[in-house]
Amino acid sequence: VFGSSIAFYNESLRERLLFEQRILNTMEDSLKRGDFQIYLQPKVEIATGKLIGAEVLVRWIHPEFGLISPGDFIPIFENNGFIYSMDLLVWEKACALLRKWKDEKRECIPLSVNVSRRDIYHEDMIQNLSDMIQKYRIQPEELHLEITESAYVKNSQQMREVIMRLRKLGFIIEMDDFGKGYSSLNTLSELPVDVLKMDLEFLRQGENTKQREQIMQFVINLANEFKVLVIAEGVERADQADLLKTMGCRYAQGYLFGRPVPSEEF
Ligand code: C2E
Ligand code: MG
Ligand code: MG
Ligand code: MG
């Protein structure tokens, strides 16, 4: 048993390394060829079901592997620095979509794009974003920037400065995955953010349900007091939506309201 489990471990590690190698070898071509696509997932007001916005989530339609989820390649891109090129493309696609909706005289909703911790430290980010909204003639408040809380906690000084400058330009900042692992409530008190996205871990079933609900209630109250909008992530069932509503959380995102779908389908 011992022997075979070692063999199995080696095999999967080998596969993992091969996969990563293929990712690294194909990313540039894929970027040029347009293999990175955007999916959209609705954000809604719980009480009415009204659409208030959408999150833009990248998907890689890989020539060999088919559709790959961001969890499988974002960490690799964050390591080698490719993330910025890919995110730029995603942001541009979001801006182009907003422009298209405007040209077609459709009702526009804000689009939220994800911003990697690494992007924040890229010296051109603010300029690139400003140029982009100018090029597509959209308002900064139509493009929301989701930044994960863990990114915010580390190196908070520089992070705060960049966020402050972005907000001054009119971009809306959403703190993503709030409460996941770090859950430092003191970031809340110095919060240069407009929206707080409560991590889906809070709604997971399992042990300490009561305790998690209490923390959730605390976070919602605090956010309401600070006039920061709260969006609950990962709402899959109606009872979760009801609970959130009674807790004073007005907005949500999750499979209950809609899965991420290709932008044309959205
Ligand atoms: P995130 O920003 O927290 O995005 C929410 C994730 O939760 C998405 O996974 C979404 O599909 C998933 N989700 C939504 N509703 C539900 C639900 O009801 N239940 C469950 N179990 N999951 C739900 P996805 O698309 O696989 O993305 C994973 C992460 O990858 C994102 O987490 C984000 O951190 C990152 N990511 C995605 N797109 C981009 C991008 O364009 N740029 C960067 N830098 N990161 C991205
Ligand atoms: Mg996000
Ligand atoms: Mg999130
Ligand atoms: Mg998340």
Image (cartoon, grey):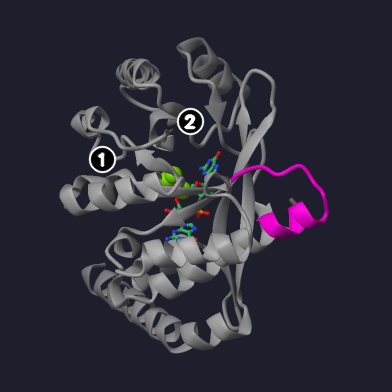
The relative height of residue 96 versus residue 7 in the rendered view (above or below) is above
Please state the total of marks drawn on the protein image. 2
Q: Which amino acid does label 2 sit on?
A: Ala
Q: Which of 230 and 109 is in front in this view?
A: 109
Q: Identify the residue at horizontal 24%, vertical 46% (top origin).
A: 160
Q: Mark 2 points at which residue?
A: 232
At a point 40% along the width and 71% down the height, the residue shown is: 84
User: In the image, is residue 52 above or below residue 226?
Assistant: below
Q: Is residue 124 above or below residue 162?
A: below
- The amino acid marked with disc number 1 is Gly
| Furthest-top residue in this view | 246
Residue at which label 1 appears: 181
Could you tell me which residue is drawn at 61 percent across and 60 percent down?
95
Looking at the image, residue 42 sits to the left or right of residue 148; the answer is right
The furthest residue to the right: 104
Question: Magenta segment, which residues?
Answer: 98-110
Q: Position of residue 182 (x, y in %)?
A: 23, 39
Image check: 165 left or right of 249?
Answer: left
Mark 2 and mark 1: span between their CA atoms? 16 Å
